[in-house]
Image (spheres, grey):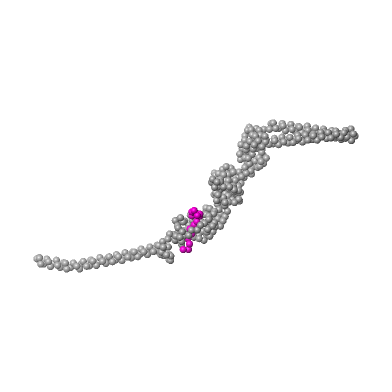
Amino acid sequence: MNYETQVKAERADLSAAPATYDDDLAATRSKRRRYALIALVVVILAGLVYWYVAGGESGSTGAPNDEQAPAVSVVAPGRTTIEGMINATGTLAARREMPVGSVGEGGRVVSVPVEPGQWVRAGQVLAVIDRSVQTPQATALAAQIEAARADAQLAQANLDRALQLVERGFISKADVDRLTATRDAAVARVKVAEAQLAERRARNAQLNIVAPAAGLLLTRDVEPGQVVGAGGGVLFSIAKGGEMELLADVGESELGQLAPGVSAEVTPVGTDKSFTGQVWQISPVIDEQDRQGTARVALAYAPELRPGGFASAVIRSGTIVAPLLPESAIQNDVQGAYVYIVGEDNKVVRRNVKTGIVTENGIAVIDGLTGTEKVVLRAGGFLAEGETVRPQLVEQAD
């Protein structure tokens, strides 16, 4: 091949190259258009999905900003009959504890026939004090009565004879008066001796320490051989009629919710048994240190109720009809208790309330709500008055 032939061949190749290049360029542009169309379709689909998830399918006609508002749970509490329960603790005691001591002359104790935990009747002997000296004294006084009666009988006989002789003129009127005075003095000495014997016998009877009323003997602080004196201290204590009570410590605010006659369930420590009682007295004063008062719950006798023991109580504080809200719905600040309610425009509004009875199911609102409002159930601390929200109604559990 010569040079001229080679040049012609190269020119022929160059003339064919532009047609192939144009075809490749057209194919590349077609692919790009397809990719762009696919990307556009993906973007449109993503927008539709976002609109659907954000609430487009709900058909809401609210403003776009409302769709972005936070969702909050709300409850319409209505009005409920609420039985108040107050939990308290306290100490068991005898409702009427009677201290018993020696009221007589005292002396050496010779017998104590009773033990703590026994039931005693009114007048039953609890302890006997030695009377080896007092008994002979009573015998001597009885003999003095007999001597005084003999003197009185003799004086009466002398007077009777004198009255018979005075009619005959053998005895003067003055002698009769003297004999009458002698008779009266003898009769008076009889009465004095009888009074002295009665006193001695009464003192001797007081040497027996007796129960002033029927009840349960709680303590015994005397033993045979012990010497006791009048007013020397408490020797026995008796729970009158066996009646017990719980001295329940109740907070100042809760104490105002109680009234005599309300029932209570008392559970002593160490047992699962509960005993029903009634509040019979409410303390008229409040302790300045712990701001508590005492509610006295009367209880019938039971072996598990031991004075001095510790017990818990659930006291029913009466019933009211009012909205009942969980604790999470009620907020507090320096102005007092309040709740957030959601109005018709879905805006949060503060409402001041007054709370009442606290129960296991919630807190009663005795003022500030009618029960028809939509009350924010929780997360009220993260809201602000006037904020727009999306309320979601929740049915309140019974």
Place of residue 319 in the rendered image (x, y in percent of width and height, measured from the top left) = 57, 55
Place of residue 161 in the rendered image (x, y in percent of width and height, measured from the top left) = 86, 34
Q: Is residue 394 left or right of residue 3?
A: right
Q: Is residue 387 left or right of residue 249?
A: left
Residue pushed farthest left?
Answer: 2
The answer to whether residue 272 shows anywhere in this view is: no
Residue at 62% across, 35% down: 222
Q: Quadrant of residue 111?
A: top right
Tell me the chief SS of the magenta region.
strand
Place of residue 340 in the rendered image (x, y in percent of width and height, measured from the top left) = 48, 58
Q: Nearer the viewer, residue 82 or 102?
A: 102
Look at the image and give the residue range highlighted in magenta. 331-345
The quarter in which the N terminus is drawn is bottom left
The answer to whether residue 36 shows anywhere in this view is: yes
Is residue 229 placed above or below 75 in the rendered structure? above
Is residue 205 placed above or below 264 in the rendered structure? above
Residue at 82% across, 34% down: 181
Q: Nearer the viewer, residue 73 or 271?
A: 73
Task: Indicate whether residue 315 is drawn in magenta.
Answer: no
Q: Nearer the viewer, residue 271 or 390?
A: 390
Is residue 220 placed above or below 321 in the rendered structure? above
Task: Indicate whether residue 344 is drawn in magenta.
Answer: yes
